[in-house]
Image: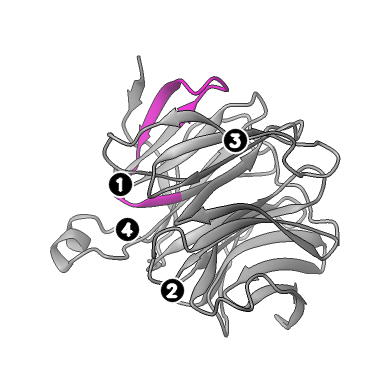
Amino acid sequence: MTDIYEFEGKTLCNTNSVLGEGPTYDPDSNTVWWFNILGKELHELNLSTGAKKVHPLPVMASVLARIDAGRQLIATEEGLFVRDIASGNLTFYAALENDRPENRSNDGRTHPSGALWIGTMSKRAENQAGAIYHVASGKVTKIFNGISIPNSICFSPDGTVGYYTDSRINRLMRVMVDPLTGLPSGEPIVLVDSMDEPGDIDGSVVDADGYIWNSRWGAGVVDRYNPDGLRISRYKVPAVQPSCPAFIGVNADRLAVTTAWEGLDENARSAQPSAGALLELGIDVKGVFDPVYVI
């Protein structure tokens, strides 16, 4: 049985993104970073001071990985770039799909080994037009093909298990992973089949106990699954399209979630003013920080 909880959290940032996505947290600066993909923006919120910045980008981008105190790796519609934090300058790092200009990056996350998994999809969300790639030290390897909307890329804390989904199919997949390289070491199996439930499996993170926290796009909730795929709790949020969660705070004991108003008509947007905001659930969690990308 799933325990259901009403929203008792707060709005961390009320800048309403068309498609808020890809949140991550930098513990060194106590800063949350996330994207407005369709708005071509990178957002920055310092939790210590409350200072908020919006950085315009020349391309659509969706995933940010820490490299060190001065650099970030970001995934974009034109490949992977190293971003200088102080200046905002982007330096080309690696190509993803130079032969597929109709595609863009979507969900992704850094594996404990320091490698990155990053998904691509059609800008028009065409069926099976995308893929999931493994990136390590600049080498890009395709690991899963024929993905329509890649999401839920995340890993067990010890790096031995990876998760992902195609949100169009709505099955959360589980695959064994080499903890030293971040490469798959087995075939994916279905962990959660929710094809017949309202909403879509979107972005996910895994906590220190191996439980999966998933944003369910279209259902206005964040679900928590145990490692066996049993949904044990559901947390309502005041936005019908939550997109991705992230552990935040100096102890990784808080949970933020990005949201979107993409595709909502005027009445739907009026009914949910939090659509597109960065929210915090207002619960205690036992999270882990995203690893740095090893360049």
In this picture, residue 31 sits left or right of residue 173: right
> Residue 159: image x %, image y %?
75, 35
Q: CA distance from mark 4 to mark 3?
A: 33 Å
Between 121 and 75, the residue placed more toward the observer is 121
Closer to the N terminus: mark 4 or mark 1?
A: 1
Residue type at tag 2: Leu
Q: Name the image colouring.
A: one colour
Amino acid type of the residue that numbered disc 4 sits on in the rendered structure: Ala
Residue under numbered circle 1: 238
Bin the neighbour count of mark 4 within 10 Å (Cα to Cα): few under 14, some 14-19, many 20 and up. Answer: many
Image-based side of 182 in relation to 270, left or right: right
Chain-order first, disc 3 or disc 2:
2
The answer to whether 116 is drawn above or below residue 62 in the figure is: above
Query: Is residue 75 visible in the rendered structure shown here?
Result: yes
Residue 142: where, in percent of width, then height? 68, 57
Task: From the image, tell me which residue sits under label 2.
Answer: 38
Which residue is located at x 49 percent, y 49 percent?
244
> In the image, what residue type sits under mark 3?
Pro
What's the residue at 37%, 36% (across, down)?
8
At horizontal 48% and vertical 36% (from top left) the residue drawn is: 172
Q: Are marks 4 and 3 in contact (CB under 8 Å)?
A: no
Q: Which residues are magenta?
A: 224-243
Q: Earlier in the sequence, mark 4 or mark 3?
A: 3
- The reply to whether residue 47 is in sight is no
Alpha-carbon distance for marks 3 and 2? 31 Å
**Could you say where residue 117 lies in the image, as x and y percent from the top left?**
67, 53
Disc 3 versus disc 1: nearer the observer = 3
Find out whether the residues at labels 2 and 1 contact each other: C-beta distance under 8 Å: no
What residue is pinned by disc 3?
A: 188
Dot 1 falls on a residue whose secondary structure is loop
